[in-house]
Each structure stands twice: as C-alpha cells, then as structure tokens.
Image (cartoon, rainbow, N blue to C red):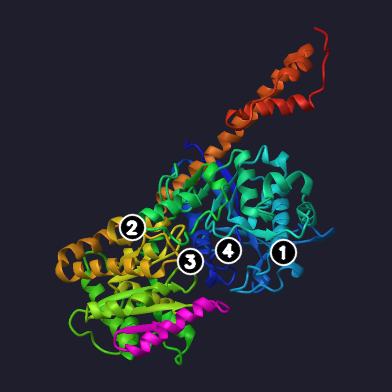
Amino acid sequence: MAKKNRKLRVAMPAWEIGRVASGLGVKIGGLGVILEELPPELVKAAARQGLDLEIEILTPCFAHYDKTRLTRLDFSPAVTLDGHTFNFAVYTHTFPDGQKVVYFWDEWQLNWTGPTAIYPSDPVMALKLYAAVSQAMAAYIRRESFHTVHLHDYHVGLVPFYLGDDTLQKLPIHFTIHNATYQGVTPINHDGYGMLRRINLPGEKLFHKYFDFFDNLNLMKACMLKVHETGGKITTVSGDIEGTWGYAAELRQNHADLWAKAYAQKGAPPGEVFVPNQHLDLFEKLPIAGITNGMSDRNRPENLPELKASVLQDMQTRRGPDRPIFSHPEVQAEMLARDHNFDANRLHIKAALKRLLHLEAFGSEPDGDPVLLTAVGRLVEQKNLGLIADIIERTLAYDPRAKFILLASAPEGDPAGKATEADFFRLAHLYPSRVYFNNGFNLPLSKLILAGGDFCLIPSRFEPCGLVDYEASLVGNIVIGRATGGLTKVRHCAYLYEWLDISDRAGEANTFYGQIQTAIDVYRRDPRRHQELVRRAMAIDASWDKSAGQYVDMYRYGLLSSQWRQERRLLVEKFVRGLGQNRRLFDTFFIPGTKEYTDPYDWELKSALKFATPGNDNP
C-alpha cells in the first residue's frame, strides 16, 4: 500500500494576490504576479518531495470585490486601534485551480479601496490599516492548525507581533521581501511608545528593540528582527541561498561601499548613489537568502495566450466592435485570424510579428530591415525609462533604420513621470516614422511589442527580481539594460551596463547608449551572433521548479529549526533545574559576553536563570 504524503499547511499573508481577471484580486506590481503563480507551483514542488501542501492566502477584502461570490465564515476577529475594539468579517473563496484565499473586511478600514487604490498615501493611515488587518490575520492563524507562516512584504510585517511569542515558539515563520525600497517607514509624532500602543502593541517593550529607525517606525526592520530571532528565514526575490548575487547581494551593500564602487566606475567622485537597503543596516548583519522568482510557462512564445486567435477573439467580443484591440485594420484581422505562437525552430513567425508590429506602430510596411528598440512599463523613478528619451535622437542618427516603439504610462500625480510622457510625445511628433509612443494600457499590444521587437530597453534604477527581462528574453527580444538586482540573471544573453552615480544622468545616458551601439553593430554586422543570442535567450529556464523547491525546503527547514529551538529550551530548563543548591552561585558569576563575544545560548540561559525559582543556596 502506497504511503500517504505528509500534510503541510501554510498560511501566506500578502496585500496583493493577482487574479485580476476574476474580479477577486489585485495586481499593482510584481507582488501580485508572484502570489498568483507561486502557490500552485509550491504544491507541485511539495508533491515531488512527498508532501501534501495546503496553502491559504490571507489578504484584505478590497471594496470592489463582490462579496456575494465569497463565503462568509462564522468568525469575526476582534481588532483594537486607538483604544477602540471592533470586529473584522472573514470570507473565503476557492478558485478553479484549487487555491483557497481568505479575505478580511472592515467597512471603516477598507471602504476607500479599489482596483488601483489599495495602498494609503498617508503613512499614519497606512500604519493603522496594516495593523488592523494584521491583527485579524493573526487571530485567524491562531485559530487554524497551520504548520508554517510565509509573509510577503512589510504590509503584513506586523503579523508576528500579534501572533505572540508563545505561538511563535511552535509556529515557524518566514518573510519574503519583494522590494526593500519600501519599508513601511512612519514618522513618529514625539512618542514612539504611544504610536505602538495605538495599534495595540506594547510600545515600551517593542519600540527600541524592533521598530526604532532614525526616529521613525520601520515595519520591515521589525519583521526582519522578529523572524530572525524565532529561527525563520528572510528571503528576497533574486540571488542564491548564500546571497552571493542579485538583489540578495545588493541589499548587503552600504553607502560607503557603493560610493567607492561608483568612484572606481567613473574615475571621479560620484554625486549621489542609490542605496538599495535604504540605509537599514540590518541587511548587512542578517543572512538574507535569494530565491529567484520564476515565471509561468504561459509566458513562453509557444504558449503565450495573447498570440492565440481564440483568446484575442474572446477579448474583442468583450470589448465590443467599437474598440478594436489593434488600431491597424490589417494587424487586427491577421492577429484574430490565426495563432502566432512560435519557438526557436519557427522564428519565421517572429519575423511575421515584427512586420505586424511595424505596421501597427507606424502604419506602413517595414523598409529593408529596421532595428526595433522597444520598452514596456511604468514611467516611475524605479524604471528609469526617461533615460530612453535622452538617447533616442543620437540612436536615430547612428542607424538610419533604427526605430523606437514605447508603451508606457505615468501614474496620476507623478510630475516626473508626466514630464517623461511629454518628452516621448514630443519625440514621436518630431519623428513620426521612427518613434512610436502610446501611454494607454493594452495587454495584447504589449505582448506584440515584446514578441515583435529586436531589443528591449530596461535601464532600471533598481530591479529586485525583474519580470519584463524574462518576458522579453523568452520571446527573443534581447535585453539592453542596467546590471542591477535580478536583471543580472539574463547577463549571458543581454547587453548590460553598470552605472551607480544617479546624479550624473548624462554619464549614465552615455554608458547606456554605448550598449545600444554595440547591440546594433552586432545585429547589422554579425547576424549569426545575434541569432545565437536570440536562441540563448529563448532557451532560458524561467520555470518555477527550482525556486518552488527551495521555498518548500525553507518550510521544512523552519520545522527543523523550531524543533532545534525547542530542544535548546529543554536543555536550558534541564540544566537550570539540575543546578539545585548552586543556582544562585552560578547566576552570580555567570555573565555572558557582548558584541562580537556574544553567545546567544548563554543569554538564553541567563534569561532562564532570571525567571527560575531559586533553590537552596547553602553549599
């Protein structure tokens, strides 16, 4: 008789879960993509290890969700803010793929939210919201029989504090940081203790040890410390377990190291460098593991839904006849008439997509062999796409058949992003046959741009993991970008530049332009080498298999670590009991070392001695 797999139940709190098309999820950034794709991959990876993994994703119930589609639980966890106690409603929903999601709703806290508005701009309001939802999540976790908790980003970083130390002694907890630029930093209004008390935490006990950050509260710092001291792992979204490359390595770098590297890079003192850890030196002291995000096989060109006629036909039906997906009639007709999926052995289909992309962008057939330089993304500081505007005109002069196709938009209320939009519109007006810019959202068009383009421009200021580099590479669109964070994972099939002085935009533009020149030269003069790069990029193993397996290993490690800590506690208790008459004598002389001579086991013993009942002190 076959042995049944061991059960492992994981609670996974996160602010975004993806699943936007269902109407019961949100995706503002990469977090939502990962939370949609990762859980089913974890289940498969666990099964390969003989584990029956059950995941429950815990997330806020945002106001636009249709609650009639959710199942309400007979459980209303109590939450306290500013001394007032109220109850959250808890709902569940199981999606067709079997994934269970638990939603937490309170009208007072969440009524203002919507599909694109889930993060408060006011830091104090944000702190209270995250605290309220975390209290409700912690109550649910304590109620259920979970074996592990896996937190995603600082928004749920208060959960461990509401779970309490007694629970954390038995329940392993891990923390994945998706973007350390945002840490939940909240200014203190003269009273850090009081701010914590207002969110139902003991300020005197917790403020200095966990939260204090240059006279602010820092939720990420607090969560990192709590997870580390309980034996859990802190991970980020690119690199290796040892943290030797990618974002895991970058987070360890301090300002002085980066400044020195920037000096060596440009041969002159830099004006300003970007510090990925935002001066939180905890990243330099704690072990941060990198587990590089994967990507669903649906993003491979042979599977890409947006290249399938039936998918586009259904999408067009929903849009209605007055809103065609593609603006050019021939492109619209061709894309909806037949599938355009391809692979490395059918690159003639990619060539056909390049022709259709040119037709869509410029309204004409390509003349000769143009080089199509593309960019898809958000016009925000992180993405640094404004740098593209700085190099467009000299690139057009360098290669008479070079063309730019850009699909990007700035968030409302972002003046720098809107200024970049204006630059792109100006260039598209000056060079209408060579620069295309669209600031609307059009998913099928974005996939056509990536699949039909030759080069994808990604000059990101920072990129914890990078998804568009994977998306572009898998469809044979070669990355030209900055060697930062997770983007370095495509170094073997891309043109990457290094630059750290963010105050010297002209210097960075020159370096970026140099890589563009090199890429165009190879495309024109060494087509065989370019084709080798295309095939190498398309052959990337971007699957979740390795990463999901590492996460499952982390869960197993957490259980072992919890067991080890329990054994330690038992050993300490046994030793203290065995001291008998000598307990007070031992306690008097036993003074553990500090700083580099600290022994955590000694301090654990010292703490146990403090609270033990004294025995007979006679010799």
The CA span between labels 2 and 4 is: 27 Å
Label whose residue precedes the other's in the sequence (3 or 4): 4
Q: Reading the chain from its start, which is encountered first: label 2 or label 4?
A: 4
Q: Are the residues flagged by discs 2 and 3 in contact, CB closer than 8 Å?
A: no
User: Between marks 3 and 1, how big is the CA–CA gap?
Assistant: 24 Å
Q: Label 1 vs label 4: CA separation? A: 20 Å
**Vertical side of 350 occupied by 219: above or below:** above
Mark 4 Cα shell of 10 Å, populated few (<14), some (14-19), many (≥20):
many
Residue on which disc 3 sits: 382
Label number found at residue 100: none
Name the residue located 58 percent from the left edge and 67 percent from the top edge.
Answer: 25
Q: Which residues are magenta?
A: 411-437
Disc number at residue 490?
A: 2
> In the rendered image, is residue 298 in sight?
yes
SS assignment at label 1: helix
Horizontal placement of 174 versus 445: left or right?
right
Q: Quadrant of residue 165?
A: top right
Residue corresponding to mark 1: 124
